[in-house]
Amino acid sequence: MGQSAIRRVRFQPPAQGVGDIEVNTLKGIRDRGGPAEFLTPQRLDFDLLAHLERGAAVHTVDFTDYSLRPGDILWIRAGQVHQWGAIDDIEGAVVLFGPHTVDDHTSNLIRSYLVRPRSHWPASELDGSPVAQALELLTISAGRRATERSDLRQAALAHSLAALLVQLALIEPPGGGPAMRLTHEAYGWFRDHLEEHFQQWHKVSEYADRLGYSARTLNRLARQYTGLSAKELIDERIVLEAKRRLAHGDAAVAEIAKDLGFDDASNFSSYFRRQTRLTPGAFRSRTRAGRSAG
């Protein structure tokens, strides 16, 4: 089996009393992890939200570079592959939380409105919003009796975190895009099934059959909320995982093809080239050359 350079990071609170939500600082996680912790790509099994207070750095999340400046917020979700930049040059608050710490109703609402989940909110977009106050409430809630775990303290943290995430979701996207609105439940089900089954199911009809909707309905909903067809969203997810494996691991193309549900490497290579205009080998070489140059 090919080896992956992506380091899996699991949620490990520094003390039992912390529970499933940890409020820390960039310095705090640097000191705890050590200098080697942040050098290679990571895939978190928890969410990480950082609010930059001082310094500047470039942070990469699934092949997109974000230039972080004071006042910015970065939200890395569980399962995403990210790469810290000059972490020693930046300071600020960090919130680490498991995927089930926010109640299902609120979590589903946030996911419904953030149809294309964002990773970065520049400070200019946060001006005039209650995000700073929500973050301050979360920090205050975490600081009270931080070594004690109680149901009330955990509830305060969970509600404060939910308020912060909701306030982020309420910020309108820049550029005059379509107004945010609650998505149809069928689209949410499709998105959940896509994340779970993209390695086996490559056709819209496979999702439609499972969900009890027509392929036409799924395509209509996907275009309504994202501007892409359901098939384009399926292809996007498959290609993202292929890019992760190619860029951050040394598995053979044939092995990656098999893992992603292709019957042979040549079919996968043809598919990848149609989607990216690069062969898998060329993409791997280009991304690794870029990292070496950086």
Image (cartoon, grey):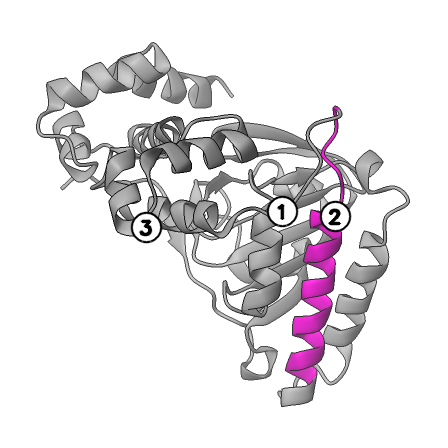
* Magenta highlight: main SS: helix
Residue 253 in sight here:
yes
Q: Name the secondary structure under disc 3.
A: helix
Q: Nearer the viewer, mark 3 or mark 2?
A: 3
The residues bearing labels 3 and 1 have C-alpha atoms spaced at a distance of 21 Å
> From this viewpoint, which residue is outermost toward the left?
264
Q: Left or right? Give the position of 234 relative to 161.
A: left
Q: Position of residue 139 (x, y in %)?
A: 77, 67
**Residue 229 falls left or right of residue 70:** left
Residue 104 lies left or right of residue 49; in this view the side is left
* Residue appearing at x 32%, y 11% in the figure: 278
**Mark 1 lies on residue:** 113
CA gap between label 3 and label 2 equals 29 Å
Query: Looking at this rendering, what residue extends furthest in the right direction?
Result: 128
Residue under label 3, please give it: 211
**Amino acid bearing label 2:** Leu
Q: Nearest the camera: 211 or 101?
A: 211
Tell me which residue sits at (26%, 50%) in the image: 210
Q: Position of residue 266 (x, y in %)?
A: 12, 18
Q: Amino acid at mark 1?
A: Tyr
For the residue pair 198 and 257, the one nearer the viewer reads as 198
Residue 170 magenta: yes
Along the line of sight, which residue is nearer the eye, 241 or 246? 241
Quickly name the residue at label 2: 170
Residues in magenta, as a range: 153-175
Estimate the x, y position of residue 160 in percent, counting from the top left.
Answer: 73, 69
Placement of 113 over or under 34, stated as above or below: above
Per the model, the C-alpha gap separating discs 2 and 1 is 8 Å
